[in-house]
Amino acid sequence: MFRKNKMRAQVSTTKDVDIYTEGYKKPTKRNLMLTEIGKSGLRWSYGKVLEEFLVELRGKNGIVVFREMSDNDPIVGGCLYAIRQIMKEVRWSVKSANPEAKELDADALFLQDCMHSMQFTWSDFITEIMSVFTYGWAIFEQVYKRRDDGKVVWKKLPLRSQSSLDRWEIDDAGDTIGMWQRPPLGGGTFYLPIKKCIHFRIGQQANNPEGKSLLRNCYRPWYYRKNIEELEGIGIERDLAGIPVMKMPEGMKMDDDSTETSAALDWAKKIVTNIRVDEQDGLILPYGWEFSLISSPGQKQFDTTAVINRYSKEIAISLLAQFTMLGMDRTGSYALSNDIMDLFHLSLEGWADSVASTFNRQAVSTLFSLNGVKDRPLPYIVHSPVRKQALKEVSEYVKTLFDINALDVDEEIKSFLKRYGRLTEFSEARR
């Protein structure tokens, strides 16, 4: 039987609040505002998230499909490659808790040292994070070690592969408290508490631990285009080679149920199904059987190229990477491509902000807490701008401000311009 829940809210004054749900302990007026009453609304069962309405994209099924899309499709793979290459150009640095400090304090120097002394490089870590674009989420375990000076630092921040997910550990309020991992080579299951991990995800609707893959919205055009391309390949082969036809000997009937006739018909079906025109083509037929190829009757009713191009554009648009298609149809302009790329860079800028925020909240705070720092503001990581203006535009802008005495080009601005133009990196590379 289902128990009917009742909810009543009565507010006469700011102090008179009476809210209760049948079956639960009624909170007192004093702790009412400190009590969580509602739920996240996440649909899940036995650790499996059921938010996705397409069964083929739920859980491990979705991981397999998204892996195929990213690794086996030129448009999807090209768009993701563009995202990865742009994100690799982003530079990450540390800022002191005091925004007015011109030099890094001891805490900031410690964080900077931890970032660049791990078993894997920071660049490798950022590259692994970008798997979140394909799957919608990525979990990294924080593995620590103790240095000779007694401080606890990161040993490494390894990715726990999305394909190794067995189930989630979710509490009654819908909050994710851990991940059960089942490695593909066996060895049982492993539980990773979320407090020991860094959990990146795209979108947090209903606090879904699996987020939402960037490839989700392009699944439909990808699916149709994939099937049309397969049919197109089969059609091209049939048009070039012809449609195979096998003529039975006189006296043999299709409706004959004898064993000999059934075996002969099965043999003939295999011939017409598997025949291929290549350097080893040829047939040896028993007496009475005749084989021929019928050429295509003419042009097909549908232009598959136009249909495939339409779906390719829809895939690029869903990833905000339609600039990759400009010029392929002899259309588009340079000005339009700039506007589209601005939007593309703006979306990546927001994602870089999300990475920095998640890392500072889940990793930096834990690192300093293990070292006994809990009562003072902490340093944090920041990233350089994703979109870079042309150096000519920046130099003209600085020159204009300098000419009208609106800018004092001090050492800080000179240092910024050198970093912006990669002059510092170039000089260091020559050493």
Image (cartoon, helix red, strand yellow):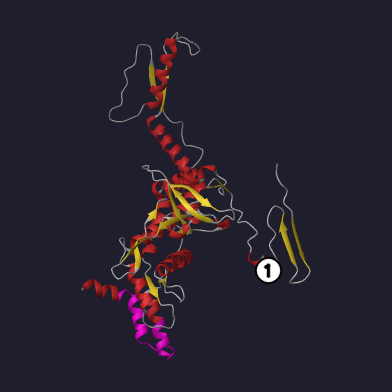
Q: Foreground residue, 157 or 421?
A: 157
Q: Foreground residue, 206 or 336?
A: 206
Which residue ends up furthest to the bottom in the rendered image?
405
- Return the x and y of residue 57 as percentages of the image width and height: 51, 45
Under circle 1, the secondary element is loop
Q: Could you tell me how many numbered marks the image carries?
A: 1
Image position of 92 (left or right of 222): left
Tell me which segment is drawn in magenta. 397-423
Q: In the image, what residue occupies the spot 42% across and 88% down?
A: 407
- Return the x and y of residue 189 as percentages of the image width and height: 42, 46
- Return the x and y of residue 27 as percentages of the image width and height: 68, 62
Image quadrant occupied by the N terminus: top right
Image position of 154 (left or right of 375): left
Image position of 248 (left or right of 10): left
Image quadrant occupied by the C terminus: bottom left
The answer to whether residue 116 of the structure is visible from this angle is yes
Q: Residues within 10 Å of mark 1 (few under 14, many from 20)?
A: few
- Return the x and y of residue 15 as percentages of the image width and height: 74, 71
Residue 413 painted magenta: yes
Q: In the image, what residue occupies the spot 39% across and 78% down?
A: 394
The answer to whether residue 211 of the structure is visible from this angle is no
Magenta segment's dominant SS is helix
Residue 154 painted magenta: no
Is residue 243 positioned above or below 193 on the image? above
Is residue 240 positioned above or below 387 on the image? above
Q: Foreground residue, 209 or 211?
A: 209
Residue corresponding to mark 1: 30
* Location of residue 273 (image quadrant): top left
Q: Foreground residue, 151 or 329?
A: 151
